[in-house]
Image: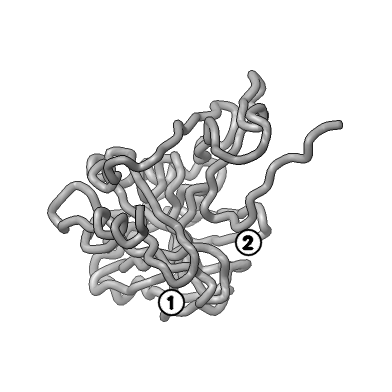
Amino acid sequence: MRVKTLAQILITEPNRSSMSANVEYGALFGTLEYLVRVGIGNPPSYQYMVVDTGSDLPWIQCQPCFHCYPQFDPIYDPKQSSSYSEASCESTKCQFLGKYHSCENQQCKYKMSYGDGSSSAGLLAYDTFRFGNTKVSSIAFGCGHQNEGFVNSGGILGLGRGDLSFLNQLGGKSAGIFSYCLVEPGSEACIGIGDETIANGAAWIPIMYNPRADPSYYYLENMVVPIPEQAFQLNYKGQGGVILDTGTVITRFPRASR
């Protein structure tokens, strides 16, 4: 199926349960990750966020920035948004952070670290998110005041399996379903959320859950690649399998044992 045709199928009306947005290849921004344009707050502050199926919490850099990296857009300022509010330590969303949160002066603080050494720390908050033509209020996100290890993006749009992922915070609007088309530079790429974004005749493979691994991860049951099928199998210890992670640039497989 041509990319242009798929992109047209994924475009939805604002009042429908599905939503979609264009995806930018990050090479133009100095990164090899894929970025999506998201508006946060009222009035909206538009940010390029990394599309990441390997993590949950959406976060962006926030003013005042005590330690931040350079980004393409102006840094989001919560004082300029009429719909911004902070999450309390007693809130359910704060508890969803588990070991990644701490409480101070009734503020819910978070700190996320990633496999490449990058990190974000700040306050858990709520604000309105605009994804494509759709506006969703009271999305919990990390307002990052100390961030490092990223390049030019405003933050991460977490699409993992956990409770705090952007996908799961949408509830019935997403039906737990998303689809994406990631292409080479110069072509139209897109991401869609909700069952109406799946094109007829599209190929698909089953997704597995590994109860012994990070609950955010999507495990693939199989792929059409020239490697032994055993590489995808999970054993009773939760070892093995292949993780779908759009926030990781390099595809890696273990070296075969001799």
Earlier in the chain: of badge 1 and badge 2, it is 1
Query: What's the residue at 27%, 54% (across, down)?
Result: 10
- Give coordinates of residue 132: x percent, y percent: 27, 63
Residue 39 falls in image quadrant: bottom left
- Give coordinates of residue 111: x percent, y percent: 56, 55
Q: Is residue 256 above or below residue 81?
A: above
Q: Nearer the viewer, residue 230 or 171?
A: 230
Identify the residue at the far top of this view.
Answer: 236
Query: What's the residue at 23%, 49% (across, down)?
Result: 18
The type of residue carrying mark 2 is: Ser
Identify the residue at the far left of this view.
Answer: 15
The type of residue carrying mark 1 is: Ile
Q: Nearer the viewer, residue 236 or 64?
A: 236
Q: Is residue 256 above or below residue 39?
A: above
The scheme the figure's colours follow is one colour
Q: Nearer the viewer, residue 158 or 194?
A: 194
Circle 1 sits on which residue? 75
Circle 2 sits on which residue? 118
**In this orientation, does residue 248 appear?**
yes
Query: What's the residue at 60%, 37% (across, down)?
Result: 242
Q: Nearer the viewer, residue 26 or 141?
A: 26
Residue 84 falls in image quadrant: bottom left
Identify the residue at the far right of this view.
Answer: 258
- Give coordinates of residue 163: x percent, y percent: 40, 40
Q: Is residue 140 above or below residue 237?
A: below
**In this orientation, does residue 68 appear?**
no
Query: What's the residue at 27%, 61% (across, down)?
Result: 128
Is 81 on the left-hand or right-hand side of 47?
A: left
- SS under mark 1: loop
- Give coordinates of residue 25: x percent, y percent: 48, 68
